[in-house]
Structures are given as structure tokens and as C-alpha cells.
Amino acid sequence: MNKNLIFRKSYVDGNWTTDGKKTFKVTNPANGKTIASVYDGGIKITKKAIKSANKASNNWSKYTAKERSKILEKWNDLILEYTESLAEIMTLESGKPINESKGEVEYGASFVKWFAEEGKRAYGDVIPSHTKSQRVIVIKQPIGVVAAITPWNFPLAMITRKVAPALAVGCTIIIKPADETPLTAIALAHLADKAGFPPGVFNLIVGTDSAGMGKTLCDSNLVKKISFTGSTEIGQLLMSRSSKTLKKLSLELGGNAPFIVFEDADIEKAVEGAILSKFRNSGQTCICVNRFIVHNKVYDEFTSKFLLAVSELKMGDGMDKNVNIGPLISQEAIKKTESFVKDALKNGGKLITGGNSIDKYFFEPTIIGNVNLEMKLAKEEIFGPVAPIFKFSSDKEAIDIANDTIYGLASYFYSKDINRCWNIAEKLQYGMVGINEGLISTEVAPFGGIKSSGQGREGSKYGIEDYLEIKYMCFGNIK
């Protein structure tokens, strides 16, 4: 591990700073060992960051898109230069397998590269006027100070996906990373400092008082937008608290992704997609499959081939390059996963493989058959390596099961029938649909959900719009 990238303080107004002497430990979820002690910021440092970002806002917004792009390009280059070191830090604090961590660094950098260019394309309009003496112009301007509250499961990419578009169009930012995984975020701030962002443009605050720090961001009239990735419950709380200041919100919340396998599916490809979309980061992603919905005619074939593929997964410390399944993030996560398995078996489910926690920190890749809608895992987000398999007999039944949830983030299905593909894709009540594909995340496409999975989109040309205000200008009395 590159110790030169391990920092322990918040980064505000171009300086490394603390709020007192209080610290908290960052531990490795694979063994419980302490990696580092980080200074624990709080409300005081949050207020300081808000003041810093607001002070820098006017100057940064006056930079040309090309000038901002050059600094973003430098940040992108530095992230890629330090891929190995960033990946090691990420694996140590999140447990994610090292190969996945390297993939995340590259994925995260792709947003910086994309929006460095896309910021130059925040086009306005000249609208044909309704009178001869007027001209109608529309321009887009940065919204101002943006707060990004990010989760532990993607400690780098969830930052760049939010921060890059904000910076590209002239917003200043305040990042509040998860206290489980602050080291990756702090290393990113160090690289941003090296890239040359002016003081106050890029601020990162670290602390365990998430409620107090979040409330401070919500209550501030200077913070114009909050972008949050996390649970639906916290998203609702942020929305409620932001109502007094009428902030713009982007919310990427919980999921309950279905994975439908129709009778005409390529089963081999479906199994490949299932492994990718279920067991990535030990099932701890918001777009991981939560429910496999398999046609009666191919249920046995799919299940047996899926079982074989799962049996080949290697579980262990993520620093081992051969490991596919790392630890769960916490003991609470282990207990929650155990509760899903116990409830499913109690309600008639069949344990096909797995079902046990190992060495306190790991949970076996698990498949449960004979699943029904009465089980908790049918309604709630699992966020662990448990794969429940439902049966269905008609397209309507598959759609009904898939849509029977408050969530609407990601969904997947496999079929060779082009007519069915169009029809099913249009009927699935989700913001994203993978059709014969289990890995759908990319910087060029809009990421986000509907219903209780949130609002707004990240990535792609659509991802820049939430950081801009539309201004209509009417020129009158033109002769």
C-alpha cells in the first residue's frame, strides 16, 4: 500500500484541517484490524466547508469550460496514474476484491474524463420570438454550492460521478463520504489538490456525526443542491429536511432488482450475467440482482448451471487476486443477511447452497429455491450474496412479480425474442433495464431510478443537467 496516499484529515479551502483532536478508527472488514485513525470532523467543519465553497463559487463559475476541463483532465490523469494504490486502499477499507477495486478506479475516472468534455456542451438556446421587437435567449448557469453524500460500497466512483459534472459546469462542492470508507475519498482529495483546483472549489469533510453534518448541509441556504446515494429512508429524510430551503436533490436510493430468465433465453449467457450482477462486491451494490425470476421450463437447467458457477467462486481477503467474494462491510450486514436466509427457510424456501457466515466477516454465496412473495427477501433489499429464485409460467406473471415492489432502480432479463424484448423492457417499471446483459453501468448512459429508488440521473449527457439552472433572457424594444 502506498502510505503517501493515506491521509487522516478533512480538506477544506485548500488546506488539510481538523475539528479538534477526536479521531475514529477505519478497519479492514476482512479481519477487523485497524488501518488508520482519522480525525473526526463534525458540524463545525461542515459549516467551515460551506463557507469555503460559497466564497469560491463566484470565481470558479467565471472560469471558462475549457479552463475547468484542463484541471479535470489533470485530475483524471492522476487518478489513473495511482490506480494500483487507490485500489489497494479501497480493498483494505471496503473489503472489495482487488480486481473489482481496480475496475472501480478506472470506472470512476471515466466520469471525470467524460464530464471534462461534457462541460463544454452545456448549450443554451435561441428561441424564435413571438414578436418582432423581442429576442428570446436561454442560457444555463451553475447552480452553486453542491453537497455530495456518498456511500461505502463504491467509495471512489460515487464521488466522481457526482463531483465531476458539478465541477465541470462551475459549481463548487462539499463531499461527505461514508465513515466506513473515508481513506479512498481523502486520497481523491489529495489528487484533486495536486490537479490544481483553486482553494474552496473542492472540499471534503470526514466525520461520524452523519446526522448532524447532513442536517447542517440541508439547513444551509448557501448549499443549493444535495446529491445522495444510500438508503431510501435516509433519502426521504434528506428530502424532508431540504424542503425549507427548496434545494435541488438527486437521490440514488435502494433497489430490488429482478432478473428474469425466459424459456427461450440463452442459459449459458444468463448464468454469466447472473454471476456478474448478483455477486459483484459480495452482493453489496444497489443494482445487484435481488430476485431471480425463472420460467418453469428452464428453472432446473438454470439453477443447476448457476449452482456450478457459484461453486467456482473463491471467498476470502480481497487483497488476494484470485478472490471473487470478499467480506461483508460489518457485523450488522452479516446479521441482516442471516436473517433473510432464516426467514426464507422458515417460509418454505429450499437451501440449494451456502447459507452460513464464515469467520465472523464473510458470508457464503447462497442460493435459495422455492421462493415465494411472503418472504422478506422478496420485498426488501438484500445487500448480500444471497440469490433467491422464483418460478413463473407466463410473461404477465413475470412482469407482475418483477414490478411488485416499491423500488424501481435496475432490472434485467434474458430472451432471444426481439418482440418480447421490446415489450418486456417497456413494461418493467425501472429506470434501467439490462437486456441479455448483467453489467450495465457506464459513464455514457444515465444511471438512476424511479419510484422509491430516487430521482435524477448520473452519468451521460443527462447527468449534467441537475447542476445547472436555466435562465430565460428577453431582449425587448429591438428595432
Image: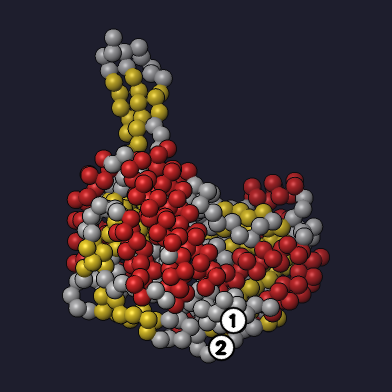
Residue 68's spot in the image, x, y percent?
A: 33, 45
Task: Give me the residue at 23% from left, 66% from top.
Answer: 16
Q: Position of residue 447 (x, y in %)?
A: 51, 53
Picture coordinates of residue 428 (x, y %)?
A: 62, 53
Say what secondary structure mark 2 lies in: strand
Asked whether, in this view, residue 346 is left or right of residue 459, the answer is: right
* Residue 358, numbered circle: 2
Q: Are marks 1 and 2 in contact (CB under 8 Å)?
A: yes
| Residue at x 43% of width, y 68% of height | 86
**Which residue is rendered at x = 35% and y = 36% of the image?**
140
At 19% from the left edge and 56% from the top edge, which residue is drawn?
A: 51
Picture quadrant of residue 126: top left
Residue 340: image x %, image y %? 56, 78
Count residues near mark 2 (Cα–Cα under 10 Å), then give few for <14, some for 14-19, many for 20+. Answer: few
Residue 321 in view of the camera? yes
| Amino acid type at image mark 2 | Ile
Q: Quadrant of the N terminus?
A: bottom left
| Label at residue 239 | none
Q: How many marks?
A: 2
Query: Which residue is tagged 1?
Result: 315
**Along the horizontal axis of the image, is 327 left or right of 439?**
left
Type of the residue with mark 1: Met
Q: Is residue 321 left or right of residue 168?
A: right
Res. 430 visible in picture: no
The foreground one among 164 and 195 is 195
Vertical arrangement, residue 472 with respect to residue 395, above or below: above
